[in-house]
Amino acid sequence: MTDGAQHIHGTTRAQDGTALAYQLQGSGHPLVLLAGQANNHHWWDGIREDFHATHHTITVDYRGTGASGKPQDGYSTPQFAEDVITVLDQLGVERADVYGTSMGGRVAQWVAARHPERVRRLVLGCTSPGGPHAVERDASVRRALAQADPGAAREALLDLMYSPAWLATHPGPYSTLGDPDMPAHARRGHLRASNEHDAWDALPRIGAPTLLLHGDQDRLTPPDNIPLLAARIPHATTHVFPGARHAYFEECRSAAGALVSGFLTAERW
């Protein structure tokens, strides 16, 4: 790594040979940003630069998305976590801060629990521990997202991601609604990976100071998951954004960015 600002797109390969695309921007301490289910690195468009005063940001196109390979199998949150470690190895990054939102928060749990020596500080946003202990979205949310009409399903997802007031003043385009070029088998793989996530037993192994963030109006991943995570992760603190839905990190960008940056740069937390 160099001290100057960087803007690098590269590719490495997972142990099973799958191509893994990554993107590096900025300068400073490494910060890995992990996107939500069925999304590529564009999830962080317009947000990642908020951290470049102190960090260089690393994003990864999950297998099945973006410029990464689209294998028929190998989709799980533990596998995504190992793919992240492969990218860090490729970049020569021994220790990084990690910020994961939605399914990215689930992936980040495995990165921090399986490889505690690689994570300095951890931020988990709008996520859950998964498995039988998690508080799941209600059936009406599942039905809305499963509508056969793509337009109706997209509108339902927008309503889950953002408040009506925010949507009224932000007409898009939106970078959090999924990678439109994903093949069907990869979409199914991502859905299965998120649904099968269960890090409950692994969470106490997370040694990094952890910040847990959530919107209090999140119906996609209910905020009742935040105290569950806080009780399992040894060094965790929490913050809830009033009025925010799933994409609190975008709707509450200024407040969320400042809170995350302060957490990552504080001498002690």
Image (cartoon, grey):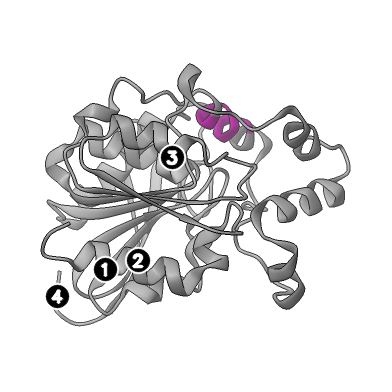
Residues under labels 2 and 1: Cα distance?
A: 5 Å
Question: In the displayed structure, does residue 199 sit left or right of residue 148?
Answer: left
Q: How crowded is mark 4: few (under 14 residues within 10 Å), some or many (20 or more)?
A: few
Q: Mark 3 points at which residue?
A: 226
192 drawn magenta: yes
Which of the 4 quarters of the picture holds residue 239?
bottom left
Residues under labels 1 and 3: Cα distance?
A: 20 Å
172 drawn magenta: no
Question: Callout 1: helix, strand or loop?
Answer: helix
Q: Name the residue under label 2.
A: 259
Q: Main secondary structure of the magenta part?
A: helix
Residues under labels 3 and 4: Cα distance?
A: 37 Å
Mark 3: amino acid: Ile
In the displayed structure, 75 sits above or below 126; it is above
Quarter of the image that includes the C terminus: bottom left
Q: Looking at the image, is mark 3 or mark 4 nearer the viewer?
A: 3
Q: Does label 3 or label 2 sit earlier along the sequence?
A: 3
**Is there a contact, CB below 8 Å, between mark 1 and mark 4?**
no
Question: Callout 4: helix, strand or loop?
Answer: loop
Q: Mark 4 points at which residue?
A: 2
- The residue range painted magenta reads 188-194
Q: Which residue is drawn at 39% across and 69% down?
A: 257
Mark 2: amino acid: Leu
Q: Does label 1 or label 3 sit earlier along the sequence?
A: 3
Mark 4: amino acid: Thr
**Is there a contact, CB below 8 Å, between mark 2 and mark 1?**
yes
Q: Residues within 10 Å of mark 3 (few under 14, many from 20)?
A: many
Residue 84, x across and y down, in percent: 31, 45
**Is there a contact, CB below 8 Å, between mark 4 and mark 2?**
no
- Work out which residue is located at the far top of the displayed protein and give it: 132
Q: Name the residue under label 1.
A: 262
